[in-house]
Image: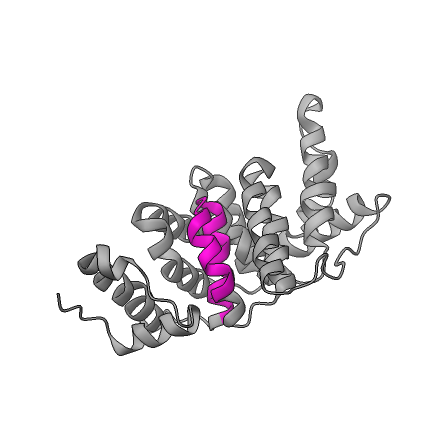
Amino acid sequence: MDINISDFSKEYHEKMFPGYVSDFLRTDPEFIERFDNFAFDEVVNQKGQELEDKTRFMAILSTLLGCQGIDEFKAMVPAALNFGVTPVEVKEIVYQAVAYLGMGRVFPFLKAVNEIFEERGIALPLEGQATTTIENRREMGTQAQVDIFGDGMKDFWQSGPEESRHINYWLADNCFGDYYTRTGLDYKQREMITFCFLAAQGGCEPQLTSHAAGNMRIGNDKAFLIRVISQCLPYIGYPRSLNALRCVNDAEKMAG
């Protein structure tokens, strides 16, 4: 059977997976022709929707965590490394995912990264990236919340009904104090990957809208977020991509 895969798609696939020939070419040739041409050519090259390769792969890894695409994630980690994502950046994406997906869903991804790194001769543990201590993590986490979302977050850690106030405290000391304060990724990258976690898992539209607004506030503007959604669409499908687009539009209206 003749398979009409574009030259660009073939070259992009080879850069992602050097020397690898997918068995889907044998078992599912018609499908792989359309998927590869779409995901590795049409989407990558859509005018006005392009992302720098490293950013694109950081978004894809985060999206695969969010949608629990463990097998595709295992394939894409080496591809991301080939496109310039560093081992530290890969680990930081996985660590931060715990705050948004929970350890129950992130555990197999952490194991997979460790296995891939050791197979590639990347020594573990990687260099530490923590900047907070147990004593100052709440204070530093609150500062991160203020930096991203504004002064209204200054007292968020002690707000809300008494019976659930501890969760707002945890958001400050754990979600932001333990993760957002780490080096390896900056705030703009951390907000982008959070946007991807939330968009890909679905059912988190209030939080996705809030983080779309946070992204825009620190410089990841609407056009950038639409590019992120566009580049991740092959991995999460149309419904969740369209939901994410709606949340971006809602966040823009709220900011206006």
The picture places residue 149, in percent across and down from the top left corner, at 62, 52
Q: Is residue 106 left or right of residue 161?
A: left
Residue placed furthest toward the right: 135
* Nearest to the observer: residue 111 or residue 180: 111
The picture places residue 160, in percent across and down from the top left corner, at 67, 29
Report if residue 209 lies within the magenta region.
no
Q: Looking at the rendering, which quadrant does residue 36 occupy? A: bottom left
The main secondary structure of the magenta stretch is helix
Q: Looking at the rendering, which quadrant does residue 60 occupy? A: bottom left
Q: Which residue corresponds to the image point at 53% horizontal and 58% vertical from the top-left?
A: 192
Quadrant in which the N terminus is drawn: bottom left
Report if residue 59 lies within the magenta region.
yes
* Nearest to the observer: residue 76 or residue 167: 76
Q: Which residue corresponds to the image point at 59% horizontal and 53% vertical from the top-left?
A: 115
Q: Which residue corresponds to the image point at 32% horizontal and 66% vertical from the top-left?
A: 43
* Nearest to the observer: residue 47 or residue 84: 84
Q: Is residue 173 above or below residue 121?
A: above
* Nearest to the observer: residue 128 or residue 147: 128
Q: Is residue 159 above or below residue 53?
A: above
Q: Is residue 251 visible?
A: no
Task: Tell me the magenta residue range.
Answer: 54-79
